[in-house]
Image (tube, rainbow, N blue to C red):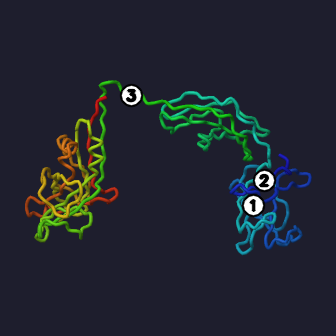
Amino acid sequence: MAASDDALIDALGQYIGSVMGDSGANTPTVRYYLGTWAGAEASDSNLSQVILQGGTWCRFVPKKAHVTGLTAGNTVILCSSPTIPLHIDGILSGNISVATAVSNDSQPPTVPTSLTVGTVTTSSVALSWIASTDNIAVTAYDIFVNGVYKLSAITNSVTVTGLASSTAYTFTVRARDGAGNVSPQSDSVSATTSTPAAPPAGTVTSYTGIYPATWSRTYNNHGGNEWDSWYGSEAHQGQYSGDNERSLIGFDTAKIAADLAGGTPVAAAIRLTFFHWWANSGGTAVIGTHGYSSPPDTYSTQNPNRWQSAGWPRGGTRSVDLGASVCAEFQAGTSKGIILGPGPSSSTQYYGKAYGAGSGVYVPTLYLTYTRTS
């Protein structure tokens, strides 16, 4: 490697200095300046160097002396005193400069030719081409999909994945060498991803719809079963200070109806997280269903206490099986949400507080499983 062909390129790929050659030695070296730049190299008293190459501190040079033994492709860190600005060939670079000794090669590789489409699937297209040549070496190929960079390959073939089915795409390829020179892009080729095969007639496919709560309110039984806005979206149940609290939890009924239309109900479940029970040992969840599409200001008796889940720990999350019939109720629209409480008695085992709508990972979530036959 001829020393006169070397340069320092910083971490952003910008030219920041020259790599010089020792007289007669023809090996890469580097110099830089400390202090105010005067536009000349005469101020040797302001020069010093610390060199890091290949992860090892190798030398400190107190003046402008050439530093030898740098290898193309190795990282070189040049450091100055924290109080003295660092200049490289007149460019202020702060107190630390990161550079790489590279060949100052300006010749790009040849254009990849004969770009060809291979195997096409519903989500991928295989490509191959005749390899490019370079005066030093081709290091990679950049693949473009519809004019946008997609990925790189180190050989002259690649499979582009993550594509949409039944979609037309255009591909081009360019070559790249170690100095960052790139060839023009190749001639383009086009391919259309496959359409997924329809299942055979009579095939039964199972689906599970996941529906996080969209609203929730707690109601008390004094003053007309009114919504207690003090609790926000929390879902309470059970007897407390003379009130037998109950909660309504609602879901996206329009999406549920659209998903289940024409399907066969199979199962239903509700996942809840109780963050508080009267007793540290836990309590009993009292679960029912309601028919509200939106949150009412006043609770009226719906279909409570259809299931009980005892021994629910404080801070615990459970999924309670509601059965295929409840999935059918949601499909028909006769059930649209979940009730917690009221407690079936004044026992404190029923007093608990669950997270409501908008509670992130703790949000009440309804699972409805159904099948379709093709």
Does residue 275 appear in the picture of this structure? yes
Instruction: Say left or right for 227 vs 46.
Output: left
Q: Is residue 68 above or below residue 166?
A: below
Q: Provide the residue designation for mark 3.
A: 198
**Rendering coords of residue 161 (x, y %):** 53, 37
> Which comes sooner in the sequence, label 3 or label 2?
2
Q: Secondary structure at mark 2?
A: loop
Q: Provide the residue designation for mark 1.
A: 51
Instruction: Say left or right for 47 vs 363.
Output: right
Q: Nearer the viewer, residue 243 or 100?
A: 243
Location of the C terminus by quadrant is: top left
Dot 2, how many residues are within 10 Å of its Cα: few (below 14), some (14-19), or many (20+)?
Answer: many
The answer for how far apart the CA atoms under marks 1 and 2 are is 9 Å
Disc 3 + disc 2, Cβ < 8 Å: no
The amino acid type found where label 1 is placed reads: Ile
Q: Provide the residue designation for mark 2.
A: 70
Residue at the spot 32% in from the left edge and 60% down from the top edge = 359
**Rendering coords of residue 365 (x, y %):** 28, 51
